[in-house]
Image (cartoon, rainbow, N blue to C red):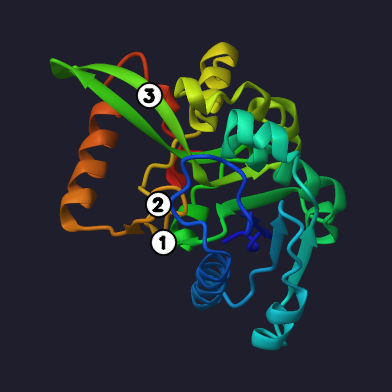
Amino acid sequence: MMNVPPLLLTSCVAVSAKNTQIKDQNLRIALTMKAIEKWFTISKAIKIVICDGSNYDFTTIIHAKFPDQQIECLFFKNNSELVARYGKGYGEGEIINHALQHSIFLNNAEIFVKCTSKLWVDNFLECLQYWNGTFLCDCYFSYMKSQKLMRFKSVDTSFYIVDKDYYRDHFSLAYLDVREAKRHWLEHCFRDIIIAKKLKHFMLPVAPIVRGVSGTQGLENRYTLIDKAKDSLKRFFVSRNKSYFDYIALTPDSK
């Protein structure tokens, strides 16, 4: 199995984006700390970069709670005016680009894992086994009348694994097209790029089990047996749809 790549957690303790349910800063910090703790139960070898776009420095509380772990804390000020105007996805794009420019851990790595700071992925190590050298994520589809009539709806940008150069080439400017007031989120911007550039083999063959709390919706992410069944069916129909079957990443045995 490949070495565990560094994990980039995107954070914004003091939110300026609209339509964000959890705005209490202490709660946002506490949820982030819980997620970090969960990540270290998943992989003790993981290096974490937490980058906050509201100028909040996690250094003191991170080193107090995780004194022996490799955690890099970055912080800067997002363009609050543009984030408020266009949405949180705009701010997330700025955060990732800032981290790629300033993180020592990311600078020394060829690939990185991205996750929203209040979330973790229970089956992360299983997902990592499908690394294809470019990009791995989950996707959403809508169905019209039947499962055969599918439409590529969006990319799950809360968690993905990506080659650093691949991200720069394809997704680093995606946030500039975010217009959440028009219901065009970062997830749609990634989708538009994938369609325009005809990218292939990026959808994880297994569903990432994303847990934690969504700051946007204020809801806890649960993964039930019904969710598992829906994810299995989704991959079954995608793999048999002529328009989308080559979205599925190749399995280790088929490489």
Label 3 amino acid?
Lys
- Badge 2: residue crowd in 10 Å (few <14, some 14–19, many ≥20): many
- The residue pinned by badge 1 equals 123
- The residue pinned by badge 2 equals 208
Q: Secondary structure at mark 1?
A: loop
Q: Earlier in the sequence, mark 3 or mark 1?
A: 1
Q: Secondary structure at mark 3?
A: strand
- Badge 3: residue crowd in 10 Å (few <14, some 14–19, many ≥20): some
The answer for how far apart the CA atoms under marks 2 and 3 are is 18 Å
Q: Quadrant of the N terminus?
A: bottom right
Q: Are marks 3 and 1 in contact (CB under 8 Å)?
A: no
Select label 2 or label 3 by which is in front: 3
Provide residue 113's location: percent of width, then percent of height. 61, 52
Q: Earlier in the sequence, mark 2 or mark 1?
A: 1
- The residue pinned by badge 3 equals 153
Q: Are marks 2 and 1 in contact (CB under 8 Å)?
A: yes
Residue 200 visible in rendering: no
Q: Earlier in the sequence, mark 2 or mark 3?
A: 3
Residue at 43% across, 51% down: 21
Residue at 76% across, 38% down: 79
The answer for how far apart the CA atoms under marks 2 and 1 are is 6 Å
Residue at 71% across, 40% down: 80
